[in-house]
Amino acid sequence: MAAVEMRRSRELLQQAEKILLHPIHPHLIAYCPTMDLIAVVTDEENLDVYRINGQRAFGLKRKSEDVSVDALQWEFRGKSIAVSWSDGSTDLVNAETGKTSHKDLMLPSIAKDGDSMVDDDVRLRVKTMGWGRNFIDVEAVKRRTGLKAENKNGNSGEQMDAFGQPTTENWDAFKDDTSVEDFLQRQPDFQTLDIAPDLPDQLAMMDMETLLPKLPAIPLPPALPFMRISQADSGAFSSQVDVDSLLHSHHLKDQNSVDMFIRCSDRGTIHPSIHDSMATVKIHLPHAWNIESTPLLHTSHPYSCSHALLMRTTSPATRKSQLAFVPLTLNFIPSAGIYLHLIASKTSQLQNLLLYITQCLQRVRTFFKHAQDLPGKFMLNISETLEEKGQGDLVTNLFHLACTGNCSPVMREWLVDELAEQGHKRWDNVVTTSLSTLLAILHENLIPAIDRCSIVISRLRGLAHFHDRDWIFTGPVQDFTALLEVLKNMRLLAHTALSCAGEEKRQFLAFSKWLRFMIDFEATEPDSQSRAEMEARDAGVDVALVLEYIQFGLSMSDLSPLMCPASAKSADDESASYEDTKKAIEVQKEGGKFKQDALCLEHVLGHFKMGVTGLLKQVSVWQDSNIQMDGGIVLEDISDVKDEDISMDMRMVFESSSPSHITTSIAISHPSHPTHLHIHRLTHSPTITSLPAHISHYAKSTLVFPLASTVLDAKFADDTHLLVLLKLAVGERGYCCILSIPYSPDMSTSTNTASAKHGISYTPIPPSSLQSLLLPNGTPISDSQHTDSIEISAAHVRKYTRHVFEGRFTPLKLVVNGRKGRRVVVVLGSDRKHYRVLDLDFRKRAKGKKEEEEGEESSSSDDDDGGDEGTDVDEERNGDGDGDGDGDGDGDVEMGGA
């Protein structure tokens, strides 16, 4: 009865509920941080993304029966979702279009190393993934969010006059409620955020590409008979939305941040990538440690260059497993400064432009082949007939017919009976449409994309020229000049192809008109009036164009040398110079022999790919040399526990009470102690390069829940509150509830005693003991030493309860995510087919004496429900002024925050 009464008074607003046909993998369910989308993977191993109303938005089919989904991770802006398969590949699916923007991104191969713990025969699989944003100028963002720098006395930087009033020194300081989350929105309003760099930096970051028109979508390939629609609709640039998301993305305008995509393999290697770049590096723990590691969780904060990893480390000798906090420090972020965003965005854009040019060339070749196939079939039949009867070839007969008007019986039979009006319509439609689309791709897609590549490479060349050789681009500046020379050749060939295609289309239109006239003329009787009228009427075509097309375009198009595939032997040859390419074009026009590779667009593109790969490799080497992962702190012993049986979560938090540090909180619950929840709290420098020197504070606390309870799951809701999914064996069946416990104590007070406002106290670990916790030989501290155990009584459970589940729904797992003012928790049922979406920023309250009495009994002296009088049924959002977010009383806590 008590559980029923508590459920009536403690109930979050349910936004959605859905039941699926197939069970969901508990570790493969994720909520989009910026949109109301829920991604799940069922036992069918297909990705399905549902809207909050239960409607399926998009998905990704299973590649084959041999693969399954290993990991799932939304991008922090919700722009795309990463799906990692058991074959080691990763696909990035665009959330706006539902199409795969990057397909089959493989982890780099493992080089053989005598000291390596990785077996070269084992394929790397992604264990977990992380996606985060790092600010380059952190202080500028802090000032924008209203955080004032402290002076030498430790006071606020705001100046006061003799009367204690603020002066006008900081009159232009920002006074709005901008927070870090405003910078992490799906499409941040940079004009409102207003953190533009100074004028010199603005001039350095000025990008003329914003003044150029957007690149259009690449036309779809021609639909052939018996072709499925899915086969025809291929490519990452088939719609304008796809092109804009890859080449004109909104996040490229944010010059004060860099996006990181972290993939962690099951063999302990870490693979970070910058922006949407497909290039990555391989980072691992020192081989000298001789330990095996498996990353389990990743977290980061925009203010910190050090990402946090929670790893399982195992000693091969003792087979003893431990959980360790391992920092991944990205030193290249502060070292490159404001130019990091420029280099990261331009190299990523260069890769996407290369993919765009490659697909353009593929479509050009496809349409050219399509324009040759059908006419080739028509001409093949008549050519065989003419050869059998010894009447020459088709070109000679057509040339004779165009000059003299005399048509042989064989040609007449072919024109009237085989080709006829219907065949001519097909011929004309296929060639005209294909050449028109080919011209459009060359003029609107390929040539503008080549020009964009030239602009990007020239920009990177300028940075490399005015910086030291050992900065980022270690190669000589001539490497960029060579790439520009290759692009110059490609542009010349593209313009040549455009000219040839235009001339060929003009000639074909004249040929097609003449051919139709000849079909109609030969279809008439020799002595009929119709023939007499046609003889007296001019065909209205330029015979010179017809003869030129019959002699050259019909049998051997000028586009053929440009569209031919590159040979495997020529891939290693040196690229032809610009002068050689010009000479080859002139020789081709004169009908002489020329170097085939000098006119092959695909061959030139291959050399450009090699140059871009070498350029990106320099960036990867610089990135690899500036990433550090050579330390860790052992947290707990998990020798006899599987990864999937541990409930754990990790979150990085910036606390205004300690503006020069970052706090990482880790919640862990073992199945061996189902009533215990361990919370580790590490306060460290934003850039961790040395352990334990950069750990300023390490504390641990253990929450002990009632004996008749089980901790099912625990997740950090925001920077202040921890959600605990608790099962209580009360009564015959018991019940399950969600608790919201404040976990971030006020560091200005003593950490040994819990204040009236916060419910968790932490026992600090002496700095002298940190050395014994370091990897590879560290051991975790025991619960009896330096650990504060907090008994959570039944009264505390009632105090912190936010939601009570009815008996027909048994929860299994929590997924917390969302955006500012719209934070939700997804609860997966124990049957793994049923999930609910609860809104953490809403509450439902009903006025009554019983509810008020229960609220008075369970609330502390700082309860904030005084504003409920006169409201029969109230449903409202939690705001800054609606209590202090301590979780007291009716569970009305503030779940916002960074």
Image (spheres, rainbow, N blue to C red):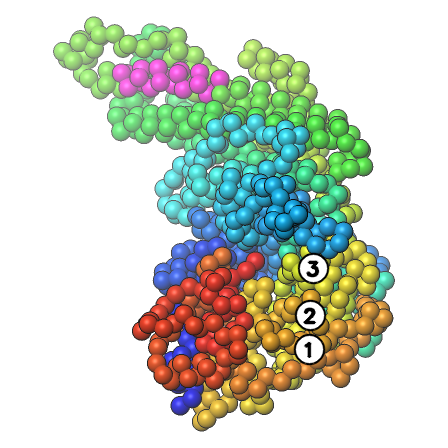
Nearest to N terminus: mark 3 or mark 2 = 3
Residue 765: percent from the left, percent from the top?
78, 73
Residue beneath label 3, please?
658
Neighbourhood count class around disc 2 (C-alpha, 10 Å): few under 14, some 14–19, many 20 upward: few
Residue range in magenta is 499-518
Whether residue 541 is in magenta: the answer is no
**Quarter of the rendering containing residue 137:** top right
Residue 749: numbered disc: 2
Residue type of the residue flagged with mark 1: Thr
Q: Are marks 1 and 3 in contact (CB under 8 Å)?
A: no
Whether residue 510 is in magenta: the answer is yes
Q: Secondary structure at mark 3?
A: loop
Q: Secondary structure at mark 1?
A: loop
Q: Residue furthest bottom?
A: 732
Residue 594: percent from the left, percent from the top?
62, 18
Q: Residue at x 33, y 72 (%)?
A: 870
Residue type of the residue flagged with mark 3: Ser
Q: Secondary structure at mark 2?
A: loop
Nearest to N terminus: mark 1 or mark 3 = 3
Residue type of the residue flagged with mark 2: Thr
Q: Are marks 1 and 2 in contact (CB under 8 Å)?
A: yes
Q: Which image quadrant: the C terminus?
A: bottom right
Residue beneath label 1, please?
753
Horizontal arrangement in the rendering, residue 388 relative to residue 205 (left or right): left
